[in-house]
Each structure stands twice: as C-alpha cells, then as structure tokens.
Amino acid sequence: MKNIKILLCGLIVIQLSCRTNTKHTDSDPTPDPVFPQRVWSAVTPAIIKPGLSFTAPILYKNLVVVDQESSDTTFSHQYVWAYDRLTGEKKWQVDYPGAVTFSDVYHNENVAVYSSGVMLSAIDLDSGQKIWSIQKTGSVYVNGYENTLLHTVDYNSAAGPWSDSSGVFLTDIRNGHSRKVFTIKRTGNFCPGLAIPTMWLNGTDTVLFFQNRGIYDAKGFPGRVDLYAYNLSKSQIEWKIDSIEDVSSLVSKTTHLNGKLYFCGMRNVYCLSPQNGQIIWKWRSNEQNASMPTGNWYFSDNKIFVKPLCGVAYALNADSGQVLWSVRQSFGTNALNMSIYKGKLYQANWGDATINIVDVNSGLEVNKLKVDSANPISIDPRNGYLYFHDYVKLNCFKLSSE
C-alpha cells in the first residue's frame, strides 16, 4: 500500500510539472505569465525637479517621442525629446520655458500638437523644430481628424475665474490657421466650458460631438454636463441632451464607433444613437468611489474596457453594455491609458507604480511590472516593444509574444 501511495504522488508531481511547461494557445483560459524584459533605458537630460508626463509616448517612424515637465520654485520648463526606438539614442530635444504643463497631444503624419490649456504648440517630428504656437485658455484636452485639430477656447471678459463664453475651433495642424465654428454663452449662473470635440463624417455631412461642462459659479462643483451634436455642414445643432450628467466630467473623449456614439461621464458610460442622441444603454459601477474623472476606457473587438477610480476593472459588451468580466484590484486605483498586445491588456497605474497585464477575454491577471513611476504607455505592435517615461528616464521593454 505504501508503494502505491508513493507511485501516485510521483504521477501527480509529473503531471503538474508537465502542466507548468505547457505552451498556452489563444483559447487557453490561463495565459503564460512571461515577464517583460528591459531592452533599454535613456535618462532624459536637463531635469531640475522632474515631474509627471501626462501624455503617452508618440511612435513615429523610427522614433519614440516623449514630453515631461521640470520645475522648481524659480524655474519651469516643458521638454519634448525624441529617441531611436530600438537603441534609445537621443535624436532631438525641444524646450518650452515658462509654467507650461502638456496634458494632451494629437499627432498626424509628421506633426504633433501639444496642449497645456494655455497654449497649443506644433512640432515637426522629423526634425524637432517648432512649427507654430497659439496662446489660448480652454480645455487642455484635444482631438483631431487627419490634419484638423479639434479644440475649444474659453473667454472671460469679466473679473473672476468664470468664463462668459466658450467656442469650438478647427485648426490646421500644418500651419496653425484656426476658425471658430461654434460658440456658447453663459446662461444664468452656469458658466460654459466646451470640451473635446469628435468629428463624424455622415454621408455628405460633417458632425461634431462635444460636451459643455457647465460650472455653477456660486457653489463651484458639481455643475453639469450637456452633450451636443452639431452639424458643421449645415451650421446647426442636430440634437442636444441637457444635464446628461449632474457632475462635471473633465477629459472623456466622446467616441464614434461602429455606428454608435459612446460617452463617458463622471459616473456613467453611455451608448447613444449618433443620429438623434437616443440613449441605447447606460452603465454604472455599483462600487464605492467608482467615478471616472479621467474617462479611462479603451475599445477593442467590440469590447469596452473601463477603469473607474475604484479597485475594479471592467470589460463591457459595446453593443449591450453587459459586463463580460470584472476584476478587483487588477489595475489599482488611479489607472492611466490602456493598450492591447497579443491578447493581453496593458495599463499603467499611478496608484501603486505598476504596469498591469490581464487577459482580455477572461480578465485574469497575467503579471505586474513594478516600475519607479508609472506614466502613460505606448506599445509598438510590430515588435511588442512597450515604452513609458518615469520621473527621470524613458524605458523600453520587450513584451511576451505568447
């Protein structure tokens, strides 16, 4: 009997050993947790007091381009650097003196336009030369379509911090020429703040979707959010939803995808008809502190990956809003942008300085990459190189192709 028990234990050990070395396929529910390997790190120069980088690295030709704020009590700069994608060799540097913090960027072909809320600045990605700059006050977040930058500007003619009117602008990224296409004025105590237009080509019509973040000047937040559809070709409002959210959201970029319009407010995710604004479905997490001030979502294969400010990440069916999976504490509490490579979802997280990796189909956590500081990430789909900037250096890691 003793020999039989020993034999059975030996068979179990052999079976577990074989399982451990099994190569997983795409249909395998348990992905192979291969750890990302560092390829290179480049220390970004001339940093006085390094700050966060709020934008994801730009991948252009053989370059990776990253920006970062640097400041102390008497000196403030914003830098933009370009490095060789494969070697980490520095190619060029642009310096912006003054109290400027870039919070968003749009790029098309060789032009990148950085936005700080008080300035728009265009850079030639081939040479690193400044092309144009526009001083403006408005939403720090921008959008674009081909060579057209979509952004907003707020105007304040009276004393105090509150805007009297707000406008939507289209700017040619090649030369900085702008035209205002829509204006909204203050109504009662609600001060307007248009934000983040999205362009939709509907047959012969061009339609812009954008939000108005109305701020109540007597009490500050919560304010409200109105959602607009504006026909640029006909110069008319197609539809408008007043107070779609009763708390002012900040950075959600309305997305048009597969014939539907998606909007992420401070508390809810919406799917709407772009033709008439009818709400198809609305979803809200029932977790505490599940607000979404950063509009933290990612679209892929008819799924919406959502990360509120709570310890739970979600995957939703884009057609129905049904929760496909939810994972507690997978992404930490303050998560940044997301990206997908080889069936895995990658996301940087300020909360615990990690880059988290989960399986896109099951939500199972594959791995966590502990870093010095987690800023927004970019992944090169050609070779699986992941790029991100921490406080002092730009990092390149090779991801698993398994």
Image (tube, rainbow, N blue to C red):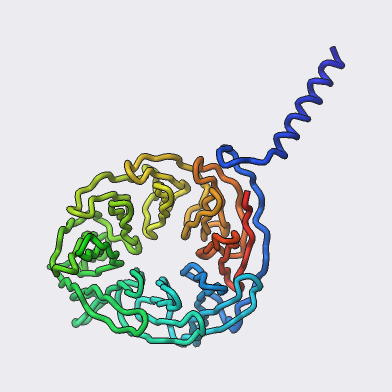
Extreme residue in the top direction: 1
Please say if 46 is above or below 107: below
Extreme residue in the front direction: 204
Q: In this rendering, does residue 219 appear at all?
A: no
Please say if 316 is above or below 263: above
Viewer-proximal residue, 56 or 147? Answer: 147
Residue 110: x and y, percent? Answer: 45, 78
Left or right: 142, with 205 as reference point:
right
Q: In this rendering, does residue 93 appear at all?
A: yes
Viewer-proximal residue, 155 or 14? Answer: 14
Viewer-proximal residue, 389 or 83? Answer: 83
Left or right: 390, with 300 as reference point:
right
- Residue ID at (20%, 64%): 204
Residue 194: x and y, percent? Answer: 25, 68
- Residue ID at (62%, 66%): 396
Viewer-proximal residue, 161 or 70? Answer: 70
- Residue ID at (84%, 21%): 6
Residue 268: x and y, percent? Answer: 31, 50
- The quarter of the picture where the N terminus appears is top right
Please say if 271 is above or below 130: above
- Residue ID at (21%, 82%): 159
How many marks overall?
Answer: 0
Tell me where residue 355 sits by quadrant: bottom right
Residue 330: x and y, percent? Answer: 52, 47
